[in-house]
Every structure is written in C-alpha cells, then in structure tokens.
Image (tube, rainbow, N blue to C red):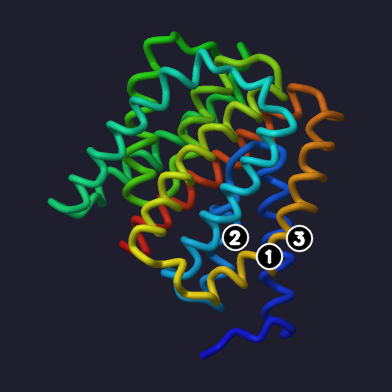
Amino acid sequence: MPFDFFSLEMMICFITLLCAYLVFGMAGFGSALIATPVLAMYLPLNMIVPILALIDLTAALLNLIKDGKNADYQEIKWIIPLMVVGSLIGAAILLKTRPDILVLLLGIFVIFYVLHSFFSKKGQSHFSKVLVIPFSLVGGVFSALFGSGGFIYAMYLSSRIADKQRFRITQMTLIGFSTLTRVIIFLVMGVYVNTDILLMALAFSPAMLLGIWAGRHITLKISREAFLKIINIIILISGITLLYRYFFIL
C-alpha cells in the first residue's frame, strides 16, 4: 500500500526522526534505536533499514565535513579492521545458528555496566587500549546480526576520549563507515531501485538536518559530566532493548 506523504503517519514518522537525529547529533549514534520501533508501525522493516542507512550516512558525512578534523583517528584505525572481522563473524553466526544467548548476555552486561557507571564513586573508568579488541569485535558482530553496534563502540570510546566533541565526531565516523558498507550492499542488491525508499529518505532528510544541528549545539553547551550521563542513558536503553528482543521477539 503506497505511503501518503501528507498523512498523520508521515508527521509522526517525521517527528520521531527529528528526535532520533537530535540524539544522533549529540551522541553520534542511537538514531535506529529510537526511530525503528515507531517506523515499524507504518513501514515494512525491509524499507526502514535501507532508508535509515541512507540518512545515517548523509548525517555522518555532513558532520565529517564540518568537524572531521576533530575525530580521533588513532582510535579509529584500530577499531575499523576489528569491526570488519566482527561483522564477518556475525554473518557466520547468523548463517549457522540463532544468536539468542548472545543477545541476552550482552543485554545483561550493558545494563550492569551502565548502572555501575551511574553509581560508582570513582566515576567513569578509563579502559586499557587492549580492550579495543573485544569491544570492536563485539560491535562488529552485533552490527551484522542486528544493525545496532554503535552503542558498543560508544561504551569503549567514552572511556578513552575525554573531549565530548572529539568523542562525538569519532563515533559518527565509525557509524559512517558502518552505514557506507550497508549502503553499498543495498546498492549491489538493487534495493535502491525502489523509488519509494529514495523518496522517503529525501522526505525525512529535513528532520535529520534539524536534529543533527540541534544536537550538535546542545553538545557544545553542556558539561562533559552531563554529556556522559546522556551517553549512558542511551546505552542503557540499548541494553533494555536487547532484553526485550530476547524475551519478546526472538
């Protein structure tokens, strides 16, 4: 059934994407986490994923053009190769077995990690460089399995990068690389031959532009402590979402 671009449903989707990209503009991840559950009420999943991939890629590129010089490329050069390996492992797991137990274990770990961060008197811990290996691999695995590995990279990077703006643009660079891979796959598969997907991505783009503009300006004005609380809240929601997926969807 064709989507009415001037309907109430379209307005709900637009407002949802505005909120999603406000979060993306602040944290560099989380857009799919917020947008997908609402969009899924009006659009099939096989349209939502390629639409969000296009919009995420555009958002990441716009931010890289503006702030790319602030990204921490020392961290990125280690994460990306391991992310690719993790994605291959995730694809293999998807082909061989149902990854239910991984969803449960990661959801529990993420929730305990965030609660520890909130209540620990020592504050945010500083991760050793060697932890780039498990975090990048697991992030790649979950990106391949569910298209949602951004919060895992955020857990690692938020403990490694002190400057909030540097963290934000580094996270966006990783998301940009991940979504670029997805967009190329969709292009090869002929997904974007469907003009409805391209038209929806175009129609939702103003929501993305407004969201990332507002998110960037909020990030510049708040303290690092407030910024880290926002990041941890988004990560906590990601963990709860994983448990919901395990108990009610898988």
Q: Neighbour class for label 1 at 10 Å: few (<14), some, many (≥20)?
A: many
Q: Position of residue 15 (x, y in %)?
A: 74, 65
Circle 1 sits in a helix, a strand or a loop, which is it? helix
Label at residue 35? 2
Asked whether disc 3 touches disc 1, contact meaning CB atoms under 8 Å apart, the reply is yes
Please determine whether, in this image, residue 109 is positioned above or below residue 102. Answer: above
> Mark 1 highlights which residue?
204
Q: Residue furthest bottom?
A: 1
Mark pair 1, 2: CA separation: 11 Å
Quarter of the image where one finds residue 11: bottom right
Please determine whether, in this image, residue 118 is positioned above or below residue 99. Answer: above
**193 on left or right of 91:** right
Residue at 53%, 75% in the rendered image: 195
Circle 2 sits in a helix, a strand or a loop, which is it? helix
Please determine whether, in this image, residue 2 is positioned above or below residue 101. Answer: below
> Mark 3 highlights which residue?
206
Name the residue nearer the viewer: 47 or 115: 47
Mark pair 2, 3: CA separation: 15 Å
Mark pair 3, 1: CA separation: 6 Å
Q: Neighbour class for label 2 at 10 Å: few (<14), some, many (≥20)?
A: many
**134 on left or right of 170:** left
Q: Residue furthest right?
A: 221
Q: Which amino acid does the dot numbered 2 rest on?
A: Ala
Q: Which amino acid does the dot numbered 1 rest on?
A: Phe
Q: Position of residue 54 (x, y in %)?
A: 55, 55
Q: Earlier in the sequence, mark 1 or mark 2?
A: 2
